[in-house]
Image (spheres, rainbow, N blue to C red):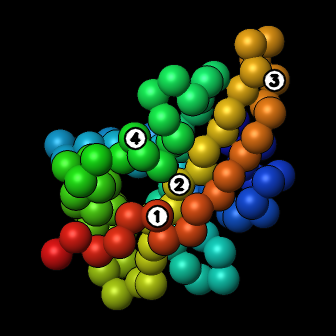
């Protein structure tokens, strides 16, 4: 999946599966100096709704707390950042049928 994200988005991946007590961030990228945290949602059908609909307010808050912890641990507190969503839909054979990249998918919950 890592090389797929680089190919699709063209970002420089700096970290994957960053975990701490607040939660997990799937991918941490850099693009023109901005830190981009990416939540990846993979779906094989729309039975439970679109991927963006699967991010609850509590999940959004956990993502923000995790992102803040990442910035703090890496001395990047003043860096410009955002949280995006990468929605990947796959067919029954496991082939990617649709990719949607939503920039600024998680707005500041403060």
Q: Distance between the residues labelled 2 and 1?
A: 6 Å
Closest to the observer, 45 or 17: 45
Residue for badge 1: 105
Which comes before the other along the chain, label 1 or label 3?
3
Residue for badge 2: 85
x and y, in percent, of residue 52 in the image: 48, 49
Which comes before the other along the chain, label 3 or label 2?
2
Front: mark 3 or 4: 4
Answer whether labels 2 and 1 touch (C-beta < 8 Å): yes
Which comes before the other along the chain, label 2 or label 4?
4
Q: Distance between the residues labelled 1 and 4?
A: 12 Å
x and y, in percent, of residue 20 in the image: 25, 44
Farthest top residue?
93
x and y, in percent, of residue 41 in the image: 53, 38
Q: Which mark is residue 23?
A: none
Helix, strand or loop under label 2: strand
The residue that appears at 39% across and 64% down in the rendered structure is 106
**Quick check: 45 above or below 39?**
above
Which comes before the other along the chain, label 1 or label 4?
4
Q: Distance between the residues labelled 2 and 4?
A: 11 Å
Q: Is 64 on the left-hand or right-hand side of 103? A: left
Which comes before the other along the chain, label 2 or label 1?
2
Q: Residue 54 carries which label?
A: 4
Answer whether labels 1 and 3 touch (C-beta < 8 Å): no
Residue for badge 3: 95
């Amino acid at each position: 999946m890592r090389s797929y994200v680089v190919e699709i988005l063209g970002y420089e991946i700096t970290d994957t599966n960053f975990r701490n007590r607040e939660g997990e961030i799937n991918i941490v990228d850099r693009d023109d100096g901005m830190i981009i945290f990416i939540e990846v949602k993979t779906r094989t059908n729309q039975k439970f709704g679109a991927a963006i609909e699967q991010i609850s307010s509590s999940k959004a808050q956990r993502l923000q707390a995790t992102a803040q912890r990442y910035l703090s641990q890496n001395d990047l507190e003043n860096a410009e950042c955002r949280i995006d969503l990468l929605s990947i839909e796959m067919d029954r054979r496991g082939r990617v049928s649709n990719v949607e990249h939503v920039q600024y998918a998680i707005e500041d919950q403060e």
